[in-house]
Image (tube, rainbow, N blue to C red):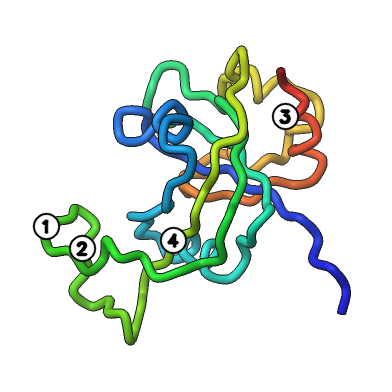
Amino acid sequence: MAERKRQYWLLKSEPTSYSLDDLKRDGTTAWTGVRNYQARNYMRDDMKPGDGVLFYHSSTDPMAIVGVCEITSVGKFDETALDPKDHHYDPKSTPQNPIWFAVDVKYKRTFAEPITLTEAKSMKGLEKMVLLQKGSRLSIQPVTDKEWEIISKRK
């Protein structure tokens, strides 16, 4: 069986909710609370340990890609769906019939200078990046090998 090719992703988070600095402090976290079916499918079906991640701070000024992380688990049941006190509670999701999934994410490094959304729009080779497409709001997005190569070179 052929070895699986490493894939790349961009994860968005509002820094007031969970920032790259929070992940750096924690080392690893479960990426829970995602309640979009396409994003859920990426975590459940496509993300695998060793995949690269660009961490993006959204809903802040400036919005920017701030660092690099790595997926460290396969998709697993998002237990926040079971907690009625959690903002992401979903009474339809059960351990026997899970609706929502999560993956574990590990901190790798922070860019000395974030790549702002404005800067990314002007970078050669990123013209087709999902993040830069009009109306692209998904909190988990695929990143191509070429886009990863361009962005992950950042010091």
Between the residue at mark 4 and the residue at mark 2, the CA separation in whole angstroms equals 14 Å
SS under mark 3: helix
Quarter of the image with the N terminus in it: bottom right
SS under mark 2: loop
Q: In this orientation, which residue lies closer to the viewer: 90 or 155?
A: 155
Report which quarter residue 35 is drawn in: bottom left
- Work out whether 11 lies above or below 116: below
SS under mark 1: loop
Q: Nearer the viewer, mark 1 or mark 3?
A: 1
Report which quarter residue 126 is drawn in: top right
Residue at image point 62% right, 65% down: 46
Q: Earlier in the sequence, mark 1 or mark 3?
A: 1
Left or right: 71, with 61 as reference point:
right
Between the residue at mark 2 and the residue at mark 3, the CA separation in whole angstroms equals 35 Å
Task: State if disc 1 and disc 2 touch (CB < 8 Å).
Answer: yes
Q: Earlier in the sequence, mark 3 or mark 4?
A: 4
- Residue 69 x %, y %: 59, 39
At label 2, the amino acid type is: Tyr
Left or right: 142, with 138 as reference point:
right
Label 2 Cα crowd, 10 Å radius (few <14 / some 14-19 / many 20+)? some
Label 1 Cα crowd, 10 Å radius (few <14 / some 14-19 / many 20+)? few
- Residue 150 x %, y %: 79, 30
Between the residue at mark 2 and the residue at mark 1, the CA separation in whole angstroms equals 7 Å
At label 1, the amino acid type is: Lys
Q: Which residue is mark 2?
A: 89
Q: Which residue is mark 1?
A: 85
Q: Earlier in the sequence, mark 4 or mark 2?
A: 2
Left or right: 23, with 153 as reference point:
left
Q: Which residue is mark 4?
A: 102
Q: Earlier in the sequence, mark 1 or mark 4?
A: 1
Q: Which residue is mark 3?
A: 151
